Image: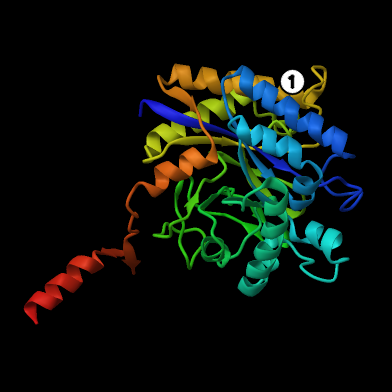
């Protein structure tokens, strides 16, 4: 593995005034714009483009900014917390759930409705998607493909937050074609999923029985809360990707638009710079060239490859069903 794609993503949430005072999101649109532009400026300093997942409210309120950033190379996709959208659009009487709590029919209706609003603001329909909190059920990928999406960053391998329907224990760690029937399996859909990168060396416990793995995000004070340095996270993730040797190797980082990314004294700003420095150093130490990419670039690479067939396993034995079918047909 000589190169690895580096994808910096941000979830662009609505303001807390638009959704709920206790929700994630900037206090007002000015703070949200400063966060987005500051993040883009830092990414540009490292020669990296950005992928921005934009909630419909933010798309409407900040359309000019997102159109401008897209014209300069950013990949813009749809972000969705159904319950936030419900409060904004339906007075809480419809879609009042996490994404994984919606039926397939509800997901179709929600995506059709919100995509139309998003498209009117941005100027085209969204092709890329991320559910809030990585909440999902087995209907997600089939519905997304049916609604015209070609890629997403929908999974956080190892995440266990049952109350938000965000369960990815055993999820695929690398970019892949999604499965129409089971969200954690490889599949043949014309939909590319780019999982959040994670350090699988140690599972970390959270409140109320939650668990996860450390990732690149600067939102969490990994050293302070979990005694895990960004150097360890970066070194381990790069090493693990190299060992897995996926067809499309990626480092996928996440953050949100309620941090002061234009304030050099802010701890999250400082952690982002440390994280990026350690990520670049880990790549250099491993002899791997980091290549700035967007989700679009990753989706293009994944969809250019043929589907990977997972082996059929039964009672501990692995069967080649295609070969068996061919042999049966020949003998008959």
Query: Where does residue 211 sit, x and y in percent of width and height?
Result: 66, 49
Which residue is painted at 89% across and 52% down in the image?
20
Which residue is painted at 53% across and 41% down in the image?
295
**Is 109 on the left-hand or right-hand side of 298?**
right
Rendering quarter of residue 100: bottom right
Q: Is residue 96 visible?
A: yes
Rendering quarter of residue 65: top right
For the N terminus, the image quarter is top left
Which residue is painted at 43% across and 43% down in the image?
300
Q: Secondary structure at mark 1?
A: helix
Query: Where does residue 127 sit, x and y in percent of width and height?
Result: 56, 51
Rendering quarter of residue 3: top left
Colouring:
rainbow
Q: Is residue 255 visible?
A: no
**Is 278 on the left-hand or right-hand side of 301?**
right
**Is 250 on the left-hand or right-hand side of 17?**
left
Query: Where does residue 122 sit, x and y in percent of width and height?
Result: 69, 46
Query: Where does residue 121 sit, x and y in percent of width and height?
Result: 73, 49
Q: Residue furthest left?
A: 331
Nearest to the observer: residue 195 or residue 59: 59
Which residue is painted at 61% across and 71% down in the image?
104
Q: Residue furthest bottom?
A: 332
For the C terminus, the image quarter is bottom left
**Is 183 on the left-hand or right-hand side of 71?**
left
Number of marks:
1
Q: Which residue is mark 1?
A: 270
Mark 1 neighbour density, 10 Å: few (under 14) some (14–19) many (20 or more) = some
């Amino acid at each position: 593995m000589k190169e690895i794609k580096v994808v910096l993503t941000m979830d662009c949430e609505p303001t807390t005034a638009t959704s709920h005072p206790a929700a994630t999101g900037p206090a007002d649109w000015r703070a949200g714009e400063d966060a987005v532009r500051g993040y883009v400026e830092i990414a540009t300093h490292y020669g990296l483009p950005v992928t921005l997942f934009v909630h419909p409210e933010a798309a409407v309120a900040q359309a000019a900014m997102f159109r401008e950033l897209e014209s300069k190379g950013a990949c813009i996709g749809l972000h969705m917390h159904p319950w936030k959208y419900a409060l904004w659009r339906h007075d809480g009487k419809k879609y009042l759930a996490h994404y994984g709590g919606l039926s397939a029919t509800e997901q179709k209706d929600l995506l059709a409705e919100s995509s139309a609003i998003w498209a009117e603001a941005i100027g085209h329909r969204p092709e890329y998607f991320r559910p809030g909190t990585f909440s999902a059920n087995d209907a997600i990928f089939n519905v997304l493909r049916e609604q015209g999406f070609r890629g997403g960053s929908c999974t956080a391998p190892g995440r266990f937050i049952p109350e938000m329907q965000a369960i990815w224990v055993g999820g695929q760690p690398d970019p892949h074609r999604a499965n129409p029937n089971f969200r954690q399996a490889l599949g043949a859909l014309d939909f590319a999923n780019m999982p959040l990168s994670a350090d699988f060396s140690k599972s970390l416990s959270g409140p109320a029985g939650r668990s996860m793995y450390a990732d690149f995000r600067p939102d969490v004070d990994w050293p302070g809360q979990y005694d895990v340095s960004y150097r360890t996270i970066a070194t381990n993730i790069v090493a693990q990707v190299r060992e897995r040797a996926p067809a499309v190797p990626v480092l996928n980082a996440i953050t949100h638009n309620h941090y002061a990314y234009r304030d050099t004294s802010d701890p999250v700003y400082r952690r982002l710079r440390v994280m990026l420095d350690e990520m670049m150093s880990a790549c250099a130490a491993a002899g791997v060239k980091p290549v700035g990419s967007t989700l679009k670039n990753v989706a293009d690479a994944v969809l250019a490859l043929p589907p990977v067939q997972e082996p059929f396993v039964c009672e501990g034995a692995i069967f080649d069903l295609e070969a068996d079918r061919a042999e049966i047909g020949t003998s008959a």
